[in-house]
Image (cartoon, rainbow, N blue to C red):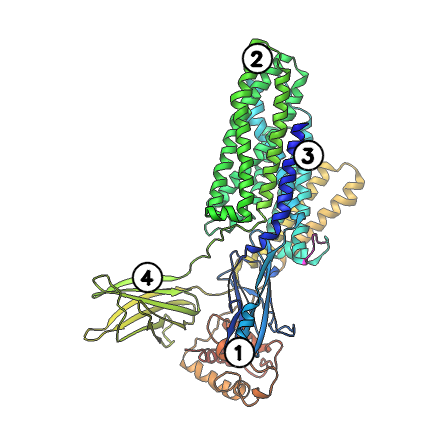
Amino acid sequence: MKLKKYSLGLVLFVLIYSAWAVPSARAHALLIRSNPAANAVLEVPPVQVEIFFSEPLEENLSSIKVFDSNNAGVDVGDVRVDPADPTRLTVSLHSLNDGVYTVTWKAVSSVDGHQTVGTFPFAVGNVNANAVSAIQQSTSFRLPFSALTSKFLLLASLALLIGQRFFIALVWNPTVNENKNESTKPAIWSMFYRIGLIGVLVSIGIGILAQAGQSTGSELAFPWNLELGRILTESRLGVIWLARLGLAMFSVWLAGRRNESPLRDWTGFAVNLALLFTVTLTSHAATEARPLLPILADWVHLIGMTFWLGGLVYFFTGLRHLQQLDRQVRTKLTSVLAGQFSINALIFVGLIGLTGFYSAYLRVGSWSALLTSLYGHVLLVKQAFVAGLLIIAATNLLIISPRLKRDQLQGVETTGLVARFRKILILELTFAALLLASVSFLTYIPPAKIADPPNTDFTSSQQVDDLKVEINISPARVGQNEFMLMLIASDGQPISTAKKVLLRFTPNQSNIAPSELELISDGEMFSAKGAHLSLPGKWQVQAVVRRQDKFDAYANFDITLPKPGASTESALIPKQTGLLILLIGLLCGLLTFSLMSKPALRFGIGLPLAFFMLGLGLFYLTRPIQVINEQANPIPPNRESVAAGQIVFTTTCAPCHGMGGKGDGPVGVTLNPRPADLTQHAIPGVHTDAQLYEWITNGFPGSRMPAFKSALSDTDRWNLVNFIRTLAPK
């Protein structure tokens, strides 16, 4: 009775602590930074909002909306995840008047599917800066009970499936064979395996509906909800859910085969391990910059837990099965089983502890974070359960098992000791279940330590005469960059004075004129910002240092800029989805003929479902891949193209946008809303050439700008894009 009360108390403690601690998780913001920054007051209206997150985003499920003080939307709606940096989410803006604006965002991780939402303000023009700074930004996430239930049920079910094969191979068969006992496996073990298979399928169903529910704002989405279809067919998460479903159905088919064979058993074991690996693919480990080792460590961690929890279930029922044997034989087998299980348990729990500490190092990072964050608190509770399991395993190995062996050799009655051993096993099962619950809870809590985003900066150095020239370009992408140059004399001291320091940018395309940028000294280094790296491809950046009474120093640096474009991975998702659905349809057919013996079930449910899945899979496999409009500018921005574009701009665009492109043309000042300030839209990296071409062709959404598709030729529109680029601030 005391043991049951103690176990119930532990369960209640974890549940109450979880309920109390969930609200404090709102302090863990996954937003890294934004432009405009939160509470910023800008003199020049921005042309887009960009937000950087700690994890790659699912474009179809993430969004940004911008509202003015009247709650009217001012964004264009072209929400986009940057293919070159999947942690960057952007949306374009209409022309903004002076005032306060509110950004609301929703971010869904493409790795684990977790959703965060938030808001922050910014202001433009003549506003009260103190009032704007007083507006709080917020970041929050919801902890869906259905998703937690799905994860716990999936792990518990896999523990029954994987733990059985581990226990039979490592504990049961060696014990029975060593003692030359012909005791058969308990019949209840087959039922446990079937329960595990059913649990996996149910957990997948709940998990898919919970994933769609996060996007619709509900606990669970209806199966016919369109959002569910989008997730399954247009996202990486959908591919993982479908792969998980296919593996589960294959495991069901293997278990339904009538002939028993070691090959079938071990094939099913491999399939179940693959199912467990899909859990790791949606864990915090998959978000690391170098995920291979963290993913493997997380997988080993889960394997250790499935052996422990599943093995305990089979160990407990195996001992009850031995009650039908003679007392001396039962005592002997119990002693050997306890020793065999405890040795393996210590190994697996040791792996749990080691991989757990490694994960804590990656996702907590410091003692203060361990003691002050929700993630750290739950991790401490989890490690307490691991410590308890280690103590119990050591007790069984060093105390219980030797006593059972001694009593068996002396022929002493051991009924009381065996009974106490079963009570210890119940406590052990409770600890293992709580450990599994804490793991499920940890997967939905943001880590205390957010991984730094990958560094794309370009850094290099050269020795030129008596100078060492060190350059840093950040973020080293097409568009606006910050250029920093450090000059170090032969004595190792930095040089802060020079007659002139400039950078000369020469693209690999010989028909593009080079440009220059003068750097300003801040006392330690020379720096400046500019959009001089305006095209993808190879560039030569030449640093020129002019000093009094010395020859000019030249240092050449070669840099290659990646080409922004549509992600090929996201374009292939429908094909991957189609293949998985097709395989699921084939498995439905196999299950129909192997498990459904009644004609009503076979022809009324099984075959129609199989044909539907086969048809759906073929549909997605044969559907053309959608190509996102990210075509490259076919006309290089040379002198002839820019001149031709200027002529088009003067006659077609200047009346509204003005000769300088600031939206102050004679017609533009009479329009509401005002025309866009092209000097900001023209900055490379803000919009692609293809996006500018699209707006010239079909008009700018929500503005008075008309479509020029019929008025201007394709060549004229591309020349116009090249000229508009020259309006960017130098």
Q: Residue at x 51, y 36 (%)?
A: 352
Mark 1 vs mark 4, foreground winner is 1
Q: Is residue 389 left or right of residue 617?
A: left
Q: Residue furthest bottom?
A: 666
Where residue 585 appears, as percent x and y from the top left, is: 68, 47
Task: First in sequence, mark 1 or 4: give its number.
Answer: 1
Figure disc tally: 4
- Mark 1 element type: loop
CB within 8 Å, label 1 to label 2: no
Q: Amino acid at mark 4?
A: Ser
Against 208, is 704 above or below?
below
Residue at the spot of label 4 = 460
Q: Outermost residue, right direction? A: 600
Labels 1 & 3 near each other (Cβ < 8 A): no
Q: Is residue 37 magenta?
A: no
Q: CA distance from mark 2 to mark 4?
A: 74 Å
How far apart in space, not on screen, are marks 1 and 3 (Cα)? 67 Å
Image quarter of the C terminus:
bottom left
The amino acid type found where label 3 is placed reads Arg
Distance from Cα at disc 1 to Cα at disc 2? 88 Å
Segment colored magenta: 216-221
Residue under circle 1?
125
**Which residue in the structure is indicated by mark 3?**
194
| Mark-to-mark CA distance, 1 and 4 | 40 Å
At a point 60% along the width and 45% down the height, the residue shown is 441
List x then y, in percent, for residue 103. Answer: 58, 67
When the figure is inspected, residue 77 is found, relative to residue 606, above or below; the finding is below
Describe the element under mark 4 as helix, strand or loop.
Answer: strand
